[in-house]
Amino acid sequence: MVKKKALSKDSKLAELIAGDRRLLQLLPRFGIALGFGDRSIEEVCRMNNVSTELFLTICAIYTDNGYKPNRAEIKSIDLGGLLPYLKASHQYYLDERFPHLEEHLQRIIKASGAKYGPMLSHFYDEYKQEVMRHIKYYEEEVVFPYIEELRKGQRSNTYQINEFRHNHTNIQDTLDDMMNILLKYLPGDILPKERIEISLDIMELSDDLNRHSVIEDHILIPYVESLENALP
């Protein structure tokens, strides 16, 4: 685990990623391609028109379990790239992670028979639909357009970012139910290797989504509140 205080713009990006492989998945969300050699984080960010401080802050959220940026830190960051980063994250979840997860899970559901298959399918569908409702139909169609209007200096009389804070849905219980079926209740002879692999995938996705929520709660919301307060 790399602590926030250990992150530096002068550190080599390759060394940072070697310290925590989860950071690899962040690079395409910032539009950063591999092949950056021994360049520093600041050099790579500059080459890709990415805010170094925003990049370091999001890396800190992924590498330091206890880190949440405060408002003073947020004020010092150029947050113009935050919405593109969040949109790229959504695209990654919906276009890559969920299809990959579903492909493997369907084989387990089919092999589980009438006793466990429908139950497992139900919990997965509920989990996926809840995530999609929040990401695709709420954030993409309501929240992000509102923020883009604020950035243009236009205030809405029908929405405020405080509503977003109250609409952040906790889907961990549904995920826990699905994991219990995979790990505890399916007979041991039902695709044991694939169940281990998909359980690891689900755990990684859950961790990623939880950190995504930290970014929205502790960077996006304060940022949008500052935009709201700046308008008459």
Image: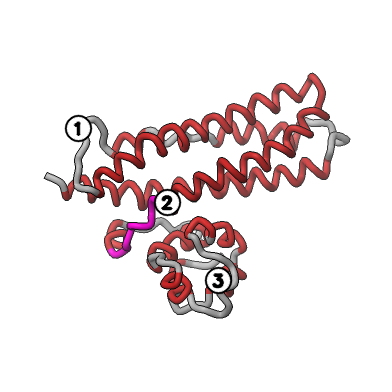
Q: Tell me, yes or no, whether the two marked residues, 3 and 1, touch with CB atoms within 8 Å.
A: no
Element on which disc 1 rests: loop
With 62 as the anchor, is 71 left or right in this view?
A: left
Q: Which mark sits nearer the N-terminus, 3 or 1?
A: 3
Residue 11, given in percent of the width and then of the height, sits at 49, 77
Q: Position of residue 178 (x, y in %)?
A: 66, 32
18 in relation to 162, above or below: below
Answer with mark 1 or mark 2, whichever residue precedes in sequence: 1
User: Is residue 164 toward the left or the right of residue 93 in the image?
Assistant: left
Residue of label 2: 215
Q: First in sequence, mark 3 or 2: give its number.
A: 3
Q: How far from the left and from the top, in percent, is residue 92?
A: 55, 47
What amino acid does circle 2 point to? Ile
Q: Residues within 10 Å of mark 3 (few under 14, many from 20)?
A: many
List the residue tagged with mark 3.
16
Q: Are marks 1 and 2 in contact (CB under 8 Å)?
A: no
- Nearest the eye: 4 or 12: 12
Q: Residue at x 26, y 33 (%)?
A: 159
Identify the residue at image location x=60%, y=35%: 175
Residue 194 within the magenta-colored segment of the rendering: no
